[in-house]
Amino acid sequence: MIHINILAVLVAAVAAFFIGFMFHGPLLGKVWMRLAKITPTGKEKLSDMTGQIFANFFSNFVSAYILAIIYLFARGSGVIGGSELWIGLISGFLVWLGFIATSTATDVIWMGKSRDLWLFECGSNLVIMLAMGAIISIW
């Protein structure tokens, strides 16, 4: 049976939420809003976003849990050599490259979404996946 460290998964999900907040808020929020063509009205309230915040956190938790499973398989298989941290980082990178970057690219390829917004979101997701991989591996 595979043992998943739920505390590490929870911390990784919180870290992902925080990183996403920083990318889309204080650090690069103005860039993101310009790329996403979002114009704030000034009437936005945190209380209006409760459902979205919960859904986003749940999504982060699921991603962290699945990444923990992939990390354990990668560590046990010997396919990725090196330290625990290295295996966690490579696992996060491979999940990002193989699933997140490629599956979201179809929005640009087929739906005409902004390439620059896609690059921004891919960058944010890469940092998130690397952070989650690192947290899961060192815990």
Image (cartoon, rainbow, N blue to C red):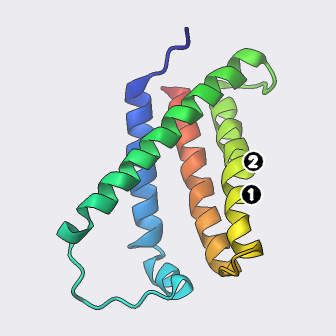
| Image position of 65 with respect to 107: above or below | above
Q: Would residue 6 be found to the left or right of residue 126 on screen? A: left
What amino acid type should be assigned to the residue bearing mark 1? Thr
In-front residue for pair 72/88:
72
Q: Residue furthest right?
A: 79
Q: Give amino acid for label 2.
A: Gly
Q: Quadrant of residue 113?
A: bottom right
Q: Position of residue 132 (x, y in %)?
A: 53, 41
Compared with 134, 71 (above or below) is above
Percent x, y of residue 94: 73, 43
Q: Which residue is mark 2?
A: 98
> Going 55% across and 29% down the picture, which residue do you hit?
68
Residue 41 falls left or right of residue 122: left
| Residue 81 marker | none
Q: Disc 1 and disc 2: Cα gap in Å? A: 6 Å
The residue identified by callout 1 is: 102
Picture quarter containing residue 102? Answer: bottom right
